[in-house]
Each structure stands twice: as C-alpha cells, then as structure tokens.
C-alpha cells in the first residue's frame, strides 16, 4: 500500500515485495552460516551477537527506506537495493540464535512444544503490527483515507504512513536488541545446567 501511495504501479510494487521476500530467505541461510561460524569462536556469546547485529540493522535500514530515499517512482532502484540488503541482514535471528540455542538448552522431549510456542508467541505479537501502524498513521501522523486520491494527497498520505511504519519498525528492533542482552548471562548458565542434568541421567541409566 505504501509503495502504491508513492505511485508505483502494481507490477513495480510486487517486484519490490518479492525482492524483500527473496532476500529474507537468503538472509536466513546467511544467519545460520554466520551463527555457526561465530559460535565456534565465542561459544557463550557468538549467537547472541549475531542476533543483536541482525535486529540492530533493522533500524538504519528502516530510516534509509522510509526517510532518506525520496518518495518517488524514480527511486525504484534505490528501494530495491535497500530492501535486498535489509532482508539479507534482518532475518538472522531465528537461524543464527533462537533455534540452535533452543536445541542447546531445551531437553529433547520438550523441543517440539517450545518451538511451537516460539512460533505462536512471535506470530501473535506480529499480528498487532498492522493495526498499530494504521492507528499511528491516522491518529498521530495525519493519514486520512477519505482524502481524494490526487498526486498531492498521495504524497501526504505516503509520508504519514511512512512515519507510522518507521515508529513500528525502529522501536521493536531496538527492543529486540535489548531483550537479547540478558542472554549473555542466562544462556551459558542454562546450557551448563542442561548438560549437567543430561550427564546425571546417563549415569543413572
């Protein structure tokens, strides 16, 4: 919708969304690759650093995408490059940190439940993003869906929507970086506890 307010046609908008989706898929692979490599150098903190890097990169790329690039159909290439780089770097958290760390600290018999809970928890929070963007754009930044769809009003609408998107992207990315920080202490302790319990169970059997 935001791209269409900038006056991109359906084909151009779909191409940009496809570029972002493809780069996110490739970014997941990169996240797993770098997570494995860094965790060998820093077994207690490497995966956490990768996740924080990925979450942090969402902030500057959001600013570039929504603020710095001129909102014009002439900026299609700039949007495409930004979306490609953004998708390649912000999609690491699950493959570089969350999933492999769960495998290390969660007993095997509970892993399916924990992975399912993780997906449900993440999905439930992300479902509030679109309504929150809409409320911010309308109530705070002046988006008005009743305005006639002229070129001037379209620019105003796109600017209002971009501010709502920016708020609902930079704030969660920043919180994500902060929420990973306690794992520098907790992860090693929990992993060692699980290993100790596993060793005791093997001795008993």
Image (cartoon, grey):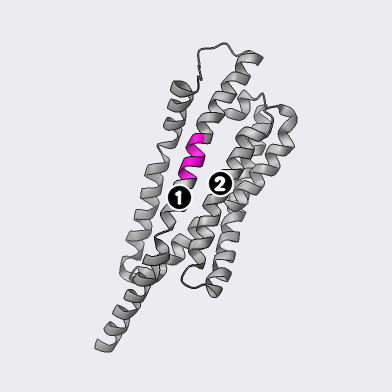
At x 47% / y 41%, what residue is drawn? 171
Secondary structure under tag 1 reads helix
Residue 193 is drawn in which quadrant? bottom left
Q: Earlier in the sequence, mark 2 or mark 1?
A: 2
Question: Which residue is at 51% across, 20% downward?
Answer: 143
Magenta-drawn stretch contains 166: no
Q: Kindly identify which numbered label has been placed on residue 176.
A: 1
Badge 1 density bin: few <14, some 14–19, many ≥20, Cα 10 Å: some
Q: Position of residue 64 (x, y in %)?
A: 64, 39
Asked whether 136 or 185 is in front, the reply is 185
Image location of residue 158, percent across then percent down: 59, 24
Q: Residue 131, how many percent across, how many down?
A: 42, 30
Q: Taking 90 as reference, is 135 above or below it?
A: above
In this rendering, position of residue 142 left or right of residue 61: left
Residue position for label 2: 58
Residue numbers of the magenta segment: 167-173
Which residue of the protein is positioned furthest toward the top in this rendering?
Answer: 148
User: Quick check: marks 2 and 1 in contact, CB under 8 Å?
Assistant: yes
Res 61 quadrant in image: top right
User: Tag on residue 65?
Assistant: none
**Vertical order, 68 against 81 (above or below):** above
């Amino acid at each position: 919708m935001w791209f269409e307010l900038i006056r991109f046609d359906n084909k151009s908008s779909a191409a940009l969304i496809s570029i972002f989706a493809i780069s996110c898929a490739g970014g997941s692979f990169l996240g797993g690759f770098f997570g494995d490599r860094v965790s060998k150098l820093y077994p207690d903190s490497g995966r956490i650093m990768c996740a924080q890097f990925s979450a942090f990169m969402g902030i500057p790329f959001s600013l570039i995408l929504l603020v710095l690039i001129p909102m014009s159909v002439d900026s299609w290439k700039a949007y495409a490059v930004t979306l490609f780089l953004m998708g390649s770097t912000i999609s690491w958290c699950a493959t570089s940190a969350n999933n492999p760390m769960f495998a290390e600290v969660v007993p095997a018999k509970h892993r399916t439940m924990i992975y399912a809970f993780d997906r449900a928890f993440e999905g439930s929070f992300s479902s509030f993003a679109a309504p929150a963007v809409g409320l911010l754009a309308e109530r705070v930044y002046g988006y008005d869906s009743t305005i006639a769809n002229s070129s001037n009003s379209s620019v105003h609408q796109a600017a209002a929507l971009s501010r709502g998107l920016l708020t609902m992207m930079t704030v969660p990315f920043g919180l994500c970086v902060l929420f990973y920080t306690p794992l520098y202490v907790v992860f090693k302790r929990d992993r060692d506890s699980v290993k100790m319990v596993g060793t005791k169970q093997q001795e008993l059997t």
